[in-house]
Image (tube, rainbow, N blue to C red):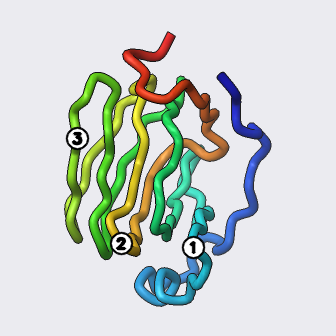
Amino acid sequence: MSVENPFPESIKFPALTIVDLAAEGEAVTAAYQNFVLSKVNNSCLRLAVFNEQYGWHYHPASDELFIVIDGCLVIDLAGGAELRLSPWNSVTIPAGTVHRTRAEGRTVNICFEKLAAETVFVDENPVSAS
């Protein structure tokens, strides 16, 4: 089990700035990019663009609200359930829920979660977080 760096990330846009989410997603050319767009109280709005699979993990103290903008985001849950999100679908993953995200083709999603939320990585095909 490993823990992602808990130090705060930079915030791309300050309050009172209009953010063109479509343009931000289109501007990403890397195979994987995930960054904080803006801060909301102690939470953040994050943009992720990717075409791969992210490792099994959970967030001990933060829910995650995913909203797909483009593509197909699949969220696998420990125990075998699979959530498939198309554009403008959303789902909340409760704190402590072991999951992984994977893209089917290039996928753009936004995520609302606690700023600098702890991420704990776990073994492949986990049954539950301990």
- Within 10 angstroms of label 3, few (less than 14), some, or many (20 or more) residues? some
- The image position of residue 80, as x and y in percent, is 25, 29
Please determine whether, in this image, residue 101 is positioned above or below residue 16. Answer: above
Task: Count numbered badges in the picture.
Answer: 3
- The image position of residue 20, as x and y in percent, is 46, 86
**Residue 31, quarter of the rendered image:** bottom right
Ranked by sequence position, the earlier of labels 2 and 3 is 3
**Residue 35, quarter of the rendered image:** bottom right
Q: Secondary structure at mark 3?
A: strand
Residue at (32% x, 73% y) in the render? 69
Q: Quadrant of the N terminus?
A: top right
Query: Gap between marks 1 and 2, in whole Å?
Result: 10 Å
Query: Gap between marks 1 and 3, in whole Å?
Result: 23 Å
Apparent side of residue 101 relative to residue 7 in the rendered image (left or right)? left
Residue at (57% x, 82% y) in the render? 28
**Residue 11, quarter of the rendered image:** bottom right
- The image position of residue 70, as x and y in percent, is 31, 75
Ranked by sequence position, the earlier of labels 1 and 2 is 1
The numbered mark at residue 53 is none
Q: Which residue is mark 1?
A: 31
Query: Gap between marks 2 and 3, in whole Å?
Result: 17 Å
The residue nearer to you, when weighing 88 against 72, is: 72
- The image position of residue 62, as x and y in percent, is 49, 33
Q: Amino acid at mark 3?
A: Glu
Q: Amino acid at mark 2?
A: Gly
Residue farthest toward the top in the current orientation of the protein = 130
Q: Which residue is mark 2?
A: 105
Apparent side of residue 119 relative to residue 26 in the rendered image (left or right)? right
Q: Which residue is mark 3?
A: 82
Ranked by sequence position, the earlier of labels 1 and 3 is 1
Q: Secondary structure at mark 1?
A: loop
Residue at (48% x, 81% y) in the render? 25
